[in-house]
């Protein structure tokens, strides 16, 4: 299984809602990532988890709260978002988050397209 | 800091034309280099990679060679198809940035019949 799955595929939420995005992989990868991608732009790194511990937070606002319950699962909890947070949210995983070569080759999921009204 | 520069798009080609998308990088140390492709409405797929100088990555008819002397990793394909229409991202990862991917701005490719 070389797939990263993400649910839901689409999400529409109001600014007062609380919702969660889910990401799952069964490749035995120990690093997982959240990226945000606006239209016609490259992905921007948000968070990196390594061995279920948060290792990088790219100064993301606290209305985004990541969680890594186990090595296969990564969640992104959303609360009090703004319309400018509307974007495609991509999850990725790699064997580890350190080391060159195939160890940090990242596999991406299809993304969740989020619209904040 | 590390950075990746890609040629500006969009690039429009006729089917069976030769494709080159230029990518140059700035990095300290010895980064790994990647090309990712994003089809409309989808996530990113790894197209090819190279982890050291003079390595050539290849996949689905696409090729790129890691050139340390020119700090480049240009993407080429001899004969493009309509199904190659997508956005192509050049990226690097390096130890001094925690091996997080550093993307170029992306190049949109449209192949017409």
Image (cartoon, helix red, strand yellow):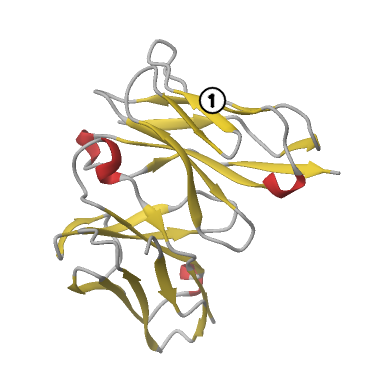
Front residue of B101 and B113: B113
In which quadrant will I find the C terminus of chain A?
bottom right
Q: Is residue A72 left or right of residue A15?
A: left
Residue at the farthest bottom position = A17
Expressed as whole percent of the image width and height from the top left, the position of residue A29 reads: 24, 58
Expressed as whole percent of the image width and height from the top left, the position of residue A31 reads: 23, 57
- Location of residue B53 by image quarter: top left
Expressed as whole percent of the image width and height from the top left, the position of residue A96 reads: 20, 50
- Residue under the image location 35 percent in, 44 percent down: B101
Front residue of A33 and A115: A33
Tell me if I can see residue B35 in this picture. Answer: yes
Q: Is residue B68 above or below residue A92?
A: above
The crowd level at tag 1 (other Cα within 10 Å; few <14, some 14-19, many 20+) is some
Q: Is residue B5 left or right of residue A63?
A: right
Residue at the farthest front position = A1
Q: Disc 1 sits on a residue from what chain?
A: B
- Residue under the image location 33 percent in, 72 percent down: A24
- Location of residue A76 by image quarter: bottom left
Q: Is residue B92 above or below residue B70?
A: below
- Residue under the image location 45 percent in, 75 percent down: A82
Q: Element at badge 1? A: loop
Q: Is residue A114 left or right of residue A34?
A: right
Residue at the farthest top position = B69
Tell me if I can see residue B100 in this picture. Answer: no
Residue that mark 1 sits on: B74
In which quadrant will I find the N terminus of chain A?
bottom left
Q: Is residue B54 above or below residue B40?
A: above
Expressed as whole percent of the image width and height from the top left, the position of residue A91 reads: 38, 63
């Amino acid at each position: 299984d070389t797939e990263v799955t993400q649910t839901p595929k689409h999400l529409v939420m109001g600014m007062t809602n609380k919702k969660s995005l889910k990401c799952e992989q069964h490749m035995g990868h120990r690093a997982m990532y959240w990226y945000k991608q606006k239209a016609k732009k490259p992905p921007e790194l948000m968070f990196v988890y390594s061995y279920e511990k948060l290792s990088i937070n790219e100064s993301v606002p606290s209305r985004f709260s990541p969680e890594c319950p186990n090595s296969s699962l990564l969640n992104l909890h959303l609360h009090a978002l703004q319309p400018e947070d509307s974007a495609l949210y991509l999850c990725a995983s790699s064997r580890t988050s350190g080391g060159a070569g195939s160890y940090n080759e990242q596999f991406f999921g299809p993304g969740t397209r989020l619209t904040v009204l | 800091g590390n950075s990746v520069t890609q040629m500006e798009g969009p690039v429009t080609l006729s089917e069976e034309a030769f494709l080159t998308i230029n990518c140059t990088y700035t990095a300290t140390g010895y980064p790994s280099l990647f090309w990712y492709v994003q089809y409309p409405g989808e996530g990113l797929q790894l197209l090819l990679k190279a982890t050291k100088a003079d390595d050539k990555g290849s996949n689905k008819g696409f090729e790129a060679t890691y050139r340390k002397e020119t700090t480049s990793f240009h993407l080429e394909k001899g004969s493009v198809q309509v199904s190659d229409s997508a956005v192509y991202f050049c990226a690097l990862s390096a130890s001094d940035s925690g091996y997080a991917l550093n993307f170029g701005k992306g190049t949109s490719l449209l192949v017409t019949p």
